[in-house]
Image (cartoon, rainbow, N blue to C red):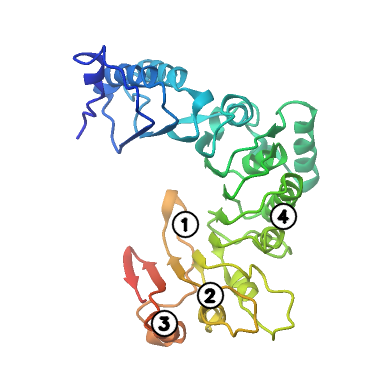
């Protein structure tokens, strides 16, 4: 449906106030150009007449009119000006793409009471950092450019209330999360997300990200409980580095309870999370995990997935590891965003010889009557196959 009904707030009910309204949630997959101007006036009226509003969740697509872009820009600016930033405790705003500097201002100055923030940064409108990804010839040059951000180009943000921070980046260049980590101090943060995409020759940048993440955790002193790590690369970056996700996890190992990872390959992570050794082992990675979500484009097989889940499903009493209660795993073969389709190493999903090693063992765990959940889904040639 193209009409949102927001324009009604600007006409018949223009004098109406909303004295007890605390939360606005608006979602539309297609906001028709013809209604943007009138709807934005209605939304601005609502925002201006809700004195107790503390939560704003606005996801309206096609706000910037394709045929009348100036109208869309004016509508967006009026909505932005009407948001009660200083009162907000929850903000999820994917209708507008902010600059990196604006996101740091929102966190550091405009929203002191914010507890949960989900924002989008579009790199091609970010004049402060534009062009770095294309003009960096080597790691040394990249580090030099990052060091320039210490000279006052971006403020150092300290926020004492923020618990959840999700930053969506379009395009997903890794420079942005690195700069955010470098310029924030978030002592109460419990759930962050890191989202990025690397080209084949940028594996070393992921190591820089992992180092900045460790510095951020040390500086903030926060104890993460949920961690989202999304590497949307379509090939495995070159380089001799250990998977940086492992470096990140060691920084938050004891506090983490839920882990969500998307990567080109997660085999090394599966091996690292597999619990080995007896009760004297003091080197178990993330011993308190009870929920794991993995999305991978390649998989070695040979039971690696089942080994990891079994080791944490019913650990012996003398091993201090939390029992898993939910595991969701997806293996993808998708040519998204006009990228070449990656090679899929899970094997033919219809070939029992390749999948039964993991599937039989996981089906046995899933059917143990405990009520805990395991899901294994393979997307292949446009088809979805659910094995567990």
- Residue beneath the point at 47% across and 57% down: 340
- Of the residues under marks 2 and 4, which one precedes in the sequence? 4
Residue corresponding to mark 3: 359
Residue drawn at the location 40% of the way across and 77% of the way down: 348
In primary-sequence order, the first of circles 4 and 3 is 4
Q: Residues within 10 Å of mark 1 (few under 14, many from 20)?
A: few
Q: Is residue 386 left or right of residue 172?
A: left
In space, the residues marked 2 and 4 are separated at their CA atoms by 31 Å
Q: Closer to the N terminus: mark 3 or mark 1?
A: 1
Residue 60 visible, this orientation? no
Q: Which residue is mark 1?
A: 340
Foreground: disc 4 or disc 3: 3
Location of residue 298 with respect to 208 vertically, above or below = below
247 and 162: which is toward the camera? 162
**Are circles 1 and 2 on residues that touch, CB within 8 Å?**
no
Q: Looking at this view, is 217 or 74 the one in front?
A: 217
Look at discs 1 and 2 and give the one toward the viewer. 2
Say which element carries label 4: helix
- Mark linked to residue 41: none
The residue that mark 4 highlights is 207
Of callouts 3 and 2, the N-terminal one: 2
> Is mark 2 in CB contact (under 8 Å) with mark 4?
no
Disc 1 + disc 4, Cβ < 8 Å: no
**Residue 227 seen:** yes
Whole-number angstrom distance, CA of label 3 to CA of label 2 = 20 Å
Q: Position of residue 31 (x, y in %)?
A: 28, 30
Quadrant in the picture for the C terminus: bottom left
> In terms of depth relative to the viewer, which is nearer, 233 or 211?
211
Q: Helix, strand, or loop for circle 1?
A: loop
Q: CA distance from mark 3 to mark 1?
A: 28 Å
């Amino acid at each position: 449906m193209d009409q949102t009904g927001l324009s009604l707030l600007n006409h018949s009910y223009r004098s109406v106030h909303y004295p007890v309204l605390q939360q606005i949630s608006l979602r539309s997959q297609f906001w028709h150009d013809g209604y943007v101007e009138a709807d934005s006036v209605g939304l601005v009226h609502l925002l201006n007449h809700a004195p107790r509003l503390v939560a704003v969740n606005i996801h309206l697509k096609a706000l910037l009119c394709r045929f009348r872009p100036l109208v869309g820009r004016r509508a967006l600016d009026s909505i932005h000006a009407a948001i009660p930033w200083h009162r907000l405790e929850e903000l999820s705003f994917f209708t507008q793409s902010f600059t990196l500097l604006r996101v740091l201002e929102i966190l550091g100055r405009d929203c002191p009471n914010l507890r949960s923030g989900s924002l989008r940064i579009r790199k091609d409108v970010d004049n402060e950092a534009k062009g770095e990804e294309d003009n960096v010839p080597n790691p040394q040059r990249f580090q030099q450019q990052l060091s320039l951000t210490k000279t006052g180009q971006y403020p150092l943000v300290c926020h004492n209330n923020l618990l959840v921070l999700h930053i969506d980046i379009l395009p997903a260049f890794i420079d942005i999360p690195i700069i955010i980590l470098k310029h924030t101090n978030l002592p109460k943060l419990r759930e962050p997300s890191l989202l990025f995409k690397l080209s084949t020759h940028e594996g070393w940048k992921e190591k820089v990200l992992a180092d900045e993440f460790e510095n951020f955790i040390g500086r903030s002193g926060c104890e993460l409980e949920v961690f989202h790590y999304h590497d949307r690369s379509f090939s495995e970056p070159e380089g001799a580095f250990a998977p940086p996700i492992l470096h990140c996890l060691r920084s938050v190992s004891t506090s983490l309870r839920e882990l969500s990872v998307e990567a080109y390959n997660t085999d090394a992570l599966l091996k690292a999370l597999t619990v080995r050794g007896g009760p004297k082992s003091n080197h178990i990675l993330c011993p308190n995990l009870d929920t794991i979500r993995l999305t991978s484009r390649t998989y070695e097989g040979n039971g690696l997935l089942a080994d990891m889940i079994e080791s944490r499903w019913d650990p012996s009493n003398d091993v201090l590891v939390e029992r898993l209660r939910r595991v969701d795993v997806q293996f993808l073969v998708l040519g998204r965003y006009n990228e070449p389709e990656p090679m899929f190493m899970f094997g033919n999903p219809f070939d029992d010889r390749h999948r039964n090693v993991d599937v039989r063992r996981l089906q046995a765990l899933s059917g143990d009557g405990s009520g805990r959940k395991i899901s294994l889904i393979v997307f292949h040639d446009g088809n979805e196959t659910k094995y567990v």
